[in-house]
Each structure stands twice: as structure tokens, then as C-alpha cells.
Amino acid sequence: MGSLPVFPLSEYYLFPGAAAPLHIFETRYRQMMDDLMDGPGRLVMVPLATEPELDAKGPVLPQVGTLVEVMQHEKLADGRWLIWLMALDWVSITEVPSDRLYRQVQAELLPEPKPARAEGMTLDLRLIEALRERAAGTWDAPLEAPTGRLADVLLQALPLDLAQKDQAYHERDPIARASMALGWHNLMSLDAEDAGTG
């Protein structure tokens, strides 16, 4: 994919399959947006810990990030940007030299193992049902959405704490992520039921 801008954000976990708004106001990231609009509009988002380890370039970047694409954008009169991002996929990243104000990385798509057909179908049905519950109505999965992607969308929809988000974000096995997502969904649903009857 060549060199891509990287946007590190403290405690910000964006899972593939999700869409999210973002407000761009720092000078370096305003420059990034100006540059992105001359190309395909893709960058890598990475979460940073509350107190990240530092090196000469700033916070040490994690090895995994989320490839995102700018789907909508508005540049305000004062130079700030309001954008809407679509998270596309998991990528491994290696930082490369940058002659811009923002940092850049070499990104490589991370393939995910496919679960056995029977196991995958069972998990997919449970994930879709959980997503429908979270959506409080009908929710149709994209055709042939892989198990890992369904799990990622559910993880983004759940009100997780930072430790849970970090654990799920750095779990590379889609079956493990699906199990996490369903387990947390079920616990939160039970807690909501208990609160409603208590």
C-alpha cells in the first residue's frame, strides 16, 4: 500500500466495519487532510495507551492498526476538518521516515484465519442476533461477512471499558474476538435485565 499517514489517538479503538466521525484541528493533521484529499483518502488509525511509552518520534506506535478511508469531509473556514471515517481492515504497521508534520507508516493487510464451516456458521448466527439486539430492530449483515468482521462490528457497538477494548483490539484470532464479543454482550444483556427487574 506504500506509505500512509498514521493518526495515533489516546484510548481510541476503531474496529473494522465501523464508521465514526472525527474532528481534525491540530496543525499536523490539517496538513495530513490536505494531503489525503489529493489521493485515495486512506490512513491508519492506532490507539495509544493513557501513558504511552515514548521515543524520539513521540509515542511508540503499536504493531497493529486500523486501515480507514475518509468517506465524507468538510473543511471549515478556520482550517479545521469534520470528517466521517469508514474502518476497512486490520493492518500491521512499521513506521517509516516522514518529511511531513505527521508520522507515516508502511502498512500491510493482516489476513485472518477462517473458522471451520460449522463453527463459523454457528458463531455468525449468534453474532447477527446480538447485533440485531443492539440495534433494537432489524439488522442485516452484509452478504458473506466473515466471522471476524461481525465480531468487530459487535465489539464497536458494545459499551466496553478500556481494558476490554484493548484486549479485543489486539486479539488476532477472529474466533477468540467473536467469543469475547458474545460473552460481553450476554453479560451486559443480563445486567440490563436485572436492572429492569430490580
Image (cartoon, rainbow, N blue to C red):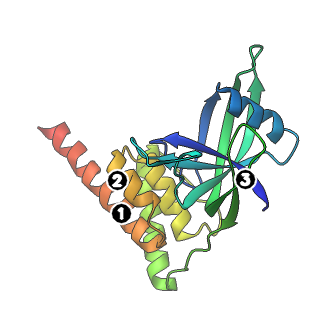
Are circles 2 and 1 on residues that touch, CB within 8 Å? yes
- Mark number, residue 172: none
Query: Where in the figure is residue 128, as x and y percent of width and height?
Result: 48, 60
Q: Which residue is mark 2?
A: 164
Residue found at x 75% / y 20%: 79
Residue found at x 44% / y 66%: 171
Considering only order in the chain, which callout, 1 or 3, is on the residue closer to the N terminus?
A: 3
Q: Quadrant of the C terminus?
A: top left
Q: Which residue is mark 3?
A: 97
Which residue, as the protein is rendered here, is positioned at the far front? 56
Which amino acid type corresponds to the residue marked 1 in the rendered image?
Met
- Looking at the picture, does residue 29 appear above or below residue 112? above
Relative depth, front residue between 178 and 5:
5
Q: Which residue is mark 1?
A: 180
Relative depth, front residue between 105 and 151:
105
- Looking at the picture, does residue 27 appear above or below residue 60? above
Considering only order in the chain, which callout, 1 or 2, is on the residue closer to the N terminus?
A: 2
Image-based side of 155 in relation to 163, left or right: right
